[in-house]
Amino acid sequence: MHSPNHTSSFRSLGTEGTAPVMEVWSARTAQLGARQDVRYVFVFENRGRAIGATIDHPHSQILAFGAVPPVALAELSADGCELCGKADDELTVARHDRWLARVPWAPSWPYEVVISPHEHVPDLPSAGRALRRGLALILVESLARLEEVLGQAEPYMLWIHQRPADGEDWPAAHLHLHLAPVLRAPGTIRHLAAAEFGAGVFFDPVDPPDAAARLRSAQLR
């Protein structure tokens, strides 16, 4: 649970209430990653009944895998670090001193946002408390932008990709968070169908630069 308040959200908790959650994620990453049978620590949140959450009280979950999962492995296997390259202004949603929120050039979900630190930090424990607090700040802001554009921030999926816990050298490991709202427009769910599941090819009904522009221009209250 993120808070004793049953209806809390990261946005309602604000940076002060969200930052302690980042510390728990980091501590659990370190604790689970120290186990000999763990190769990857996966932090995630499913928020809202429409995405399958069965508990209404906001909460995140952590899985400890005995192998690096396929999606994370595909990112880690890239030549070099794509997140260290110069950010495309057209896809940028928010830029802070130490963090960047951007729409991927080929997102799987409309209005999907990737949040990453400017510096090449491999995982949550390595980030340090100050950088993790910065993550809380830009996460809350990103959720606020989604709410302004889509009329609601929820339902959404959130997951973190970070360095595997196998002790190997992973030069492409750059800590980042994926924030994927499940709406394609206000009140309209983005459903996955046969092509996505059967072919493994995702079709984004919202042009990525357009999604970034809408999120970037959102008037925050």
Image: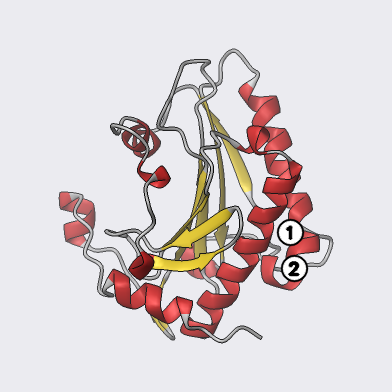
Q: Position of residue 109 (x, y in %)?
A: 35, 64
> Mark on residue 171?
none
Determine the CA span between mark 2 and mark 1. Answer: 6 Å
> Mark on residue 18?
1
Q: In this view, does 130 lie to the left or right of 147?
A: right
Q: Where is residue 21 in the image (x, y as percent from the top left)?
A: 73, 51
Residue 26 image-quadrant placement = top right
For the point 41% across and 81% down, the residue is 214
Look at the image and tell me in which quarter the C terminus lies. Answer: bottom right
Q: Is residue 69 left or right of residue 204?
A: right
Q: Is mark 2 on a helix, strand or loop?
A: helix
Q: Is residue 91 visible?
A: yes
Look at the image and tell me in which quarter the N terminus lies. Answer: bottom right
Look at mark 2 in the image and give the residue it sits on. Answer: 14
Q: Where is residue 113 in the image (x, y as percent from the top left)?
A: 44, 62
Q: Where is residue 94 in the image (x, y as percent from the top left)?
A: 52, 67
Other-residue count near label 2 (Cα within 10 Å), few / some / many at <14 / 14–19 / ≥20: some
Q: Is residue 1 visible?
A: no
Q: What element carries label 1?
A: helix
Residues 88 and 133: in front is 88
Does residue 15 sit above or below 30 in this rendering?
below
View extreme (right): residue: 4
For the point 43% across and 24% down, the residue is 170
Three-letter amino acid code at the position of disc 1 = Thr
For the point 67% across and 62% down, the residue is 137
Q: How many marks?
A: 2
Residue 80 image-quadrant placement = top left
